[in-house]
Image: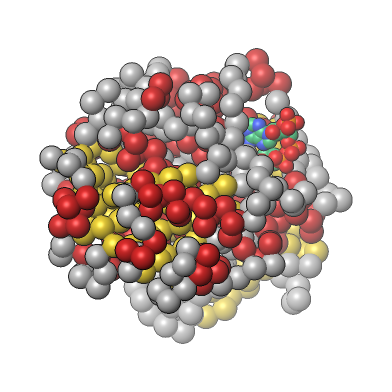
Amino acid sequence: MEEGIFALRCGKCGWMTATYAVACASCGTGGLERVRLKGDGRVLSFTILNVPTEEFAQDAPYAYAVIDMNEGCSTSGWMPSVRSAGDIEVGDSVRFSGRRGRASIFVKS
Amino acid sequence: MRGVCVVGTAMSRFGKMSESARESMTMTSMKAIEDAGLSPGDIGAAFYSNAFGVAERQLHIGPLINSALGIGDRPSIAIESACSSSSAAINEAYAHIAAGLEDICLVAGGEKLSHLSTMEATTYFAMGSDYTYEASNGVTFPGLYASMAVAHMNRYGTTQEMLASVAIKNHSNALLNPLAHLRKKLTMEAYKESPVVAYPLHLYDCCPFSDGSAAVVLASEEKARELKDEIVRIEASERAGTAATLQDRRDMTGIEGAAVASKRAFARAGMDAAEVDVAEVHDCFTIAEIMAIEDIGFFRKGEGGRASVEGETAIGGRIPVNPSGGLKGKGHPVSATGAAQFHELYEQLLGKAGRRQVDGAEVALAHNIGATGGSCTVHILRRRR
Ligand SMILES: CC(C)(COP(=O)(O)OP(=O)(O)OC[C@H]1O[C@@H](n2cnc3c(N)ncnc32)[C@H](O)[C@@H]1OP(=O)(O)O)[C@@H](O)C(=O)NCCC(=O)NCCS
Ligand SMILES: [Zn+2]
């Protein structure tokens, strides 16, 4: 997996997504361009997982956050260093700090 | 379009069962056919749902069930739409009958999950998310709804007590339902002491992993009038979608597809939310019921929590929601849920719901969500003479 965090951007209207897409959900244009994100954003929402899936069996508790990236799209982040609800709030500044497998690791900044 | 009616329903006891989903769905289908006053040979086509069949190492159960019903020559198809599978199947059967392709159709959904450990089941359920972008970042199904709950609490001031009130109500309704999975009174103390699964959702905010099955027989209005004195007509069968991955949505405090499907359903039925007497909604988590009653339009956006804590959704309240106990109390054998909502509402409309009867119910609404709202189905049923 290439280091860094990426998104797709519509060349026509600027709509962005950090998931998989081949056409713009806003204006319908095909051919989205891949852009590298700087990695800074804010917590839009979060949860603390105590009952994980098999892949994260050894890791709980940890936070999962939906993050509004400064470039204008949202992404999902794994926050292994945040272990309780008292350690995180909606609006907190966070940054991308690397990967484990397909997970994008975020830390508070 | 021809009118389409519900003529028979059945469900198994929800909870842990020893038989396979295929066996349970076959037995429940037979009960629904008998409830309709029909025999298997009257079924033109069958629509089945068993989203987690692979967990039992069995796919393509349609022909197995048809053969066991002695109608191996009839067409069947499996419909997968995550937790809304069997209401999507009902929508397909409805369309077949409305279009005149068939006169009588069978729909059944079922699941067997109790042989899986908590972690195995959690992993299977996570497959209903966008696995690459969501589950791969550590989130589970309860976790996705938990992040919607945090967003809702943050924007509207929804509280933990409001979430708890949904669970307490649905547990107490389930106590009145002999087929429910969890038949246990829930107190605020027990709620608060229960372990946190995914903050802010406690164990008692979550529906359980359930086994079970439910079935519905649909018929053209003409056939229904031959079979029954009083008919229950499907006034609307509407589906809509929402961006699949939570992070791609403008708003995480509601489910857009559910609001769209509800609007379309009310337009099709020529009525509004105030005319609904009883509703079964998708309360896979307590926050999901709060969002559902807002998305449908029973309450203004942000008012769902307050309405719940004030008892407006209890049996006897302004709009009784989930008298069956809902997914939370009755249980949620994923693919059985849409058909089980129909079973409850059919009994309610015919005045056969026993101690959970909503007096004089004539118009009913079913709201069923697949995954975090990627798939949404809303049905409106009405009793007619
Ligand atoms: C909450 C959850 C993690 C509990 O896992 P589990 O494997 O059922 O837990 P356990 O088997 O350890 O259950 C412990 C006890 O709590 C009870 N219990 C389990 N889940 C319960 C629930 N949701 N509500 C109330 N009681 C529950 C069990 O009956 C058991 O009681 P017992 O010891 O008296 O038999 C699991 O039920 C869950 O993830 N639910 C959500 C399912 C989901 O995501 N569905 C899709 C929604 S769209
Ligand atoms: Zn565009």
Q: Is residue B338 above or below residue B48?
A: above
Front residue of B222 and A45: B222
Give the residue furthest to the right: A58
Q: Is residue B215 visible?
A: yes
Q: Residue at x 57, y 78 (%)?
A: A34
What residue lies at 52% left-to-right and 29% top-to-bottom? B178
Q: Residue B277: x and y, percent?
A: 26, 31
Residue B256 at least partly seen: no
Q: Please state the horizontal and vertical placement of residue B83, each as a whole percent of the image.
A: 51, 53
In the figure, B80 relative to B378: above or below? below
Q: Nearer the viewer, residue B336 or A12?
A: B336
Q: Picture coordinates of residue B3 (x, y %)?
A: 17, 57
> What sort of colour scheme is used for the picture?
secondary structure
Counting from the top left corner in percent of width and height, residue B129 is at 59, 59
Left or right for B90, reference B30: left
Q: Residue at x 39, y 38 (%)?
A: B344
Q: Note whether B194 is above or below B123 in the view shown.
A: above
Q: Quadrant of the C terminus of chain B?
A: top left
